[in-house]
Image: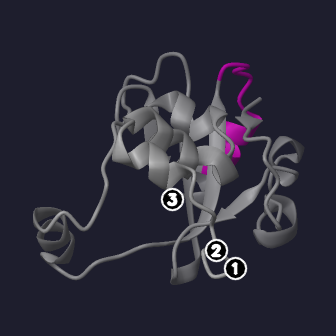
Amino acid sequence: MASCSTAPPARTSGKTIVADLPDALKECPLYMGGPVQSSALSFLHSDLLLPDANVMPNLSLGHSIDDLVELGESLSVTRKLKMFAGYAGWSPGQLENEMKHKAWLTHPASLELVFDTAPEQLWQHILRSKGGKYRLLAQSPEDCLPN
């Protein structure tokens, strides 16, 4: 049985995904990915040994509802899963250009950040761990207008 992230977003997969999901997945949170094609399903999954991982060691990205159902029916107690609706997209060369102009902050990925850090704390957690000027940014309020 796959375990799901515990931080509850506004939606659960069982109430949003039109498919016959295993009971183990029906109460899993469904996170809103990006503004593009909000009906597209993506999921990240991990296990202790995932030899064909396609994102980084022991972490894979999937899009198939059949693969998702298979993961939900598995008996692995170490498998972790996080589901998303929608995604962010860029035109050809756009992301590379933004990276070249340092429009993005980057940080090494880890399974702990993906599955064990509460989504509402992820940004601050990463900024604090980067230290220096980023630590100050991590302490900024989400909405600076009242200041």
Q: CA distance from mark 3 to mark 2?
A: 34 Å
Q: Quadrant of residue 39?
A: bottom right
Q: What residue type is disc 2 on?
A: Asp
Residue at numbered disc 1:
146
Q: Secondary structure at mark 2?
A: loop
Q: Are marks 2 and 1 in contact (CB under 8 Å)?
A: yes
Q: Residues within 10 Å of mark 1 (few under 14, many from 20)?
A: few
Q: Secondary structure at mark 3?
A: loop
Q: Quadrant of the C terminus?
A: bottom right
Does 33 sit above or below residue 58? Answer: below
Q: What residue type is disc 3 on?
A: His
Magenta residue check for 74: yes
Mark on residue 143?
A: 2
Q: CA distance from mark 1 to mark 3?
A: 41 Å
Q: Secondary structure at mark 1?
A: loop
Residue 68 lies left or right of residue 134; in this view the side is right
Magenta residue check for 109: no
Q: Quadrant of residue 77?
A: top right
Residue 71 lies left or right of residue 8; in this view the side is left
Residue drawn 77% across and 54% down? 29
Q: What residue type is disc 1 on?
A: Pro
Residue 54 lies left or right of residue 72; in this view the side is left
Q: Which residues are magenta?
A: 68-78
Q: CA distance from mark 2 to mark 1?
A: 7 Å
Mark on residue 78?
A: none
Give the percent coordinates (x, y) of residue 14: 85, 61
Give the percent coordinates (x, y) of residue 124: 56, 47
